[in-house]
Image: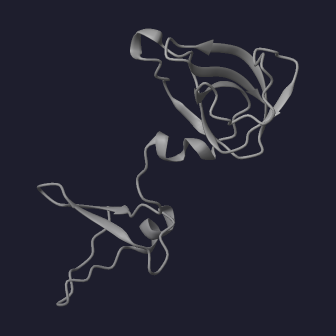
Amino acid sequence: METTKLSSKGQVVIPGSLRKSHHWESGQELVVIDVGDGILLKSAAVFEETQINDVASCLKYTGDGWIYLGNKNTGLIVNTPANISIKTVIYKLKKATNLRTGKPEKSNGYKLQSFVRTLKEGSEVKILELDIDKNGHFWVQVDEL
């Protein structure tokens, strides 16, 4: 344990051995936390706190997921044939759309579970499964290529 003194300006010198062990350089921003019988110094966060949904689209994801095409196919897929269930053809998205995991739950108004990421305009996908709800809404499971 080391000791230090509080200056008349309220400054404290943190012993060099502690600065070195915590990799604190001159100008390091610290968070000061009152712990009742003393204070705790911690490195300030370099980035703002985020939730997984805030950054999930940055993650590399390959594989299948579900996209919502809208009512009677709103034209997200280029040159969609009359029989959209053909699985051997590669389609290009006309506009960006969200890729989600989990099969749509019919009991939940066909809402999808978790967001994976946004597929960009021009992304190539292969349709694996098609589902159409009672209102004519197209839900397709796709494999992103």
From what the image shows, is residue 116 above or below residue 113? below
- Find residue 67 and report its horizontal and vertical position in percent: 62, 28
Residue plotted at (53% across, 13% down): 133
Residue toward you, 140 or 48 = 140
Residue at left offset 69%, top offset 35% = 61
Q: Quadrant of residue 27?
A: bottom left
Locate residue 51 relative to residue 136 in the image: left or right. left
Residue 132 or residue 9, whichever sits in front: 132
What residue do we see at 73% from left, 34% from top?
A: 77
Q: Report the label total.
A: 0
Looking at the image, the residue that sits furthest to the right is: 88
Toward the left, the furthest residue is: 36
Coordinates of residue 7 in the picture (x, y in percent): 21, 87
Query: Which of the pair 143/121 is nearer the observer?
Result: 121
Give the left or right position of residue 135, taking residue 89 as reference: left
Side of 10 relative to 55 (left or right): left
Q: Residue at x 76, y 19 (%)?
A: 84
- Which residue is at the far bottom? 8
Quadrant housing residue 70: top right
> Height in image: 2 above or below 115?
below
Q: In the rendered view of the protein, which quadrant contains the C terminus?
A: top right
- The residue lying toward the viewer, choosing from 25 and 101, is 101
Where residue 121 appears, as percent x and y from the top left, is: 72, 46
Q: Is residue 68 left or right of residue 36?
A: right
Q: Position of residue 24 (x, y in %)?
A: 47, 70
Q: How was this image coloured?
A: one colour
Q: In what quadrant of the picture does the N terminus appear?
A: bottom left
